[in-house]
Image: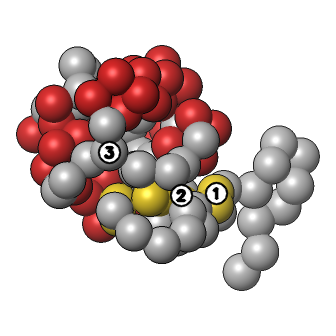
């Protein structure tokens, strides 16, 4: 009987930890909407792209300043740190023309998410 009791609590613990981890890191849901014109966007706008952040956003802006505008959206992979995996995450948000309209859909800390 004791083995069943221990197994039960181990399963419960795994479920709880997994739920907390998923809620904390929100891996399955993109939390931005809109587009980023990589030829005109600011570092803070580029940093909103999934998986990029401020450091890579700076790299993108520096690359653009040193090499001119991107000719294709795939050219962003020429930026150090942006490979195929990161490109797959951001390609639906990247454009070469038009305004940058990206915004975070993640609620601010302390703000409840609307349903």
Q: Which residue is mark 2?
A: 31
Does the image show residue 103?
yes
Q: Which numbered disc, 2 or 1, marks the residue closer to the eye?
A: 1
Q: Quadrant of the N terminus?
A: top left
Few, some or many C-alpha atoms within 10 Å of disc 1 (few <14, some 14-19, many ≥20)? some
As drawn, the residue found furthest toward the right would be: 110
- Of tags 3 and 1, the one toward the viewer is 3
State the residue in front, 42 or 25: 42
On the rendered image, what quadrant is the C terminus found in? bottom right
How much space separates mark 3 and mark 2, taking CA atoms?
27 Å
The residue indicated by pointer 3 is: 69
Q: Is residue 22 left or right of residue 78?
A: right
Check whether the beta carbons of the residues at disc 2 and disc 1 lie within 8 A of each other: yes
* Residue at 32% in and 45% down: 69
Q: Residue at x 16, y 44 (%)?
A: 75
Residue 112 location, x and y as percent? 84, 61
Q: Which mark is residue 104?
A: 1
Q: Quadrant of residue 68?
A: top left
Residue 14 position by quadrant:
top left
Q: What is the secondary structure assignment of the residue under circle 2?
A: loop
The disc, 3 or 1, on the residue closer to the chain's N-terminal end is 3
């Amino acid at each position: 009987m004791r083995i069943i009791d221990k197994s039960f609590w181990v399963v419960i613990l795994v479920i709880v930890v997994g739920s907390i981890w998923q809620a904390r890191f929100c891996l399955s849901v993109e939390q931005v909407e809109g587009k980023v014109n990589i030829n005109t966007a600011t570092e803070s706008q580029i940093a909103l792209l999934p998986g990029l952040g401020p450091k890579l956003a700076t790299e993108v802006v520096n690359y653009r300043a040193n090499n001119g505008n991107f000719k294709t959206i795939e050219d962003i992979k020429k930026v150090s740190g942006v490979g195929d995996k990161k490109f797959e995450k951001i390609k639906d948000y990247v454009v070469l023309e038009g305004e940058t309209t990206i915004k975070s859909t993640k609620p601010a800390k302390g703000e409840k998410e609307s349903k």
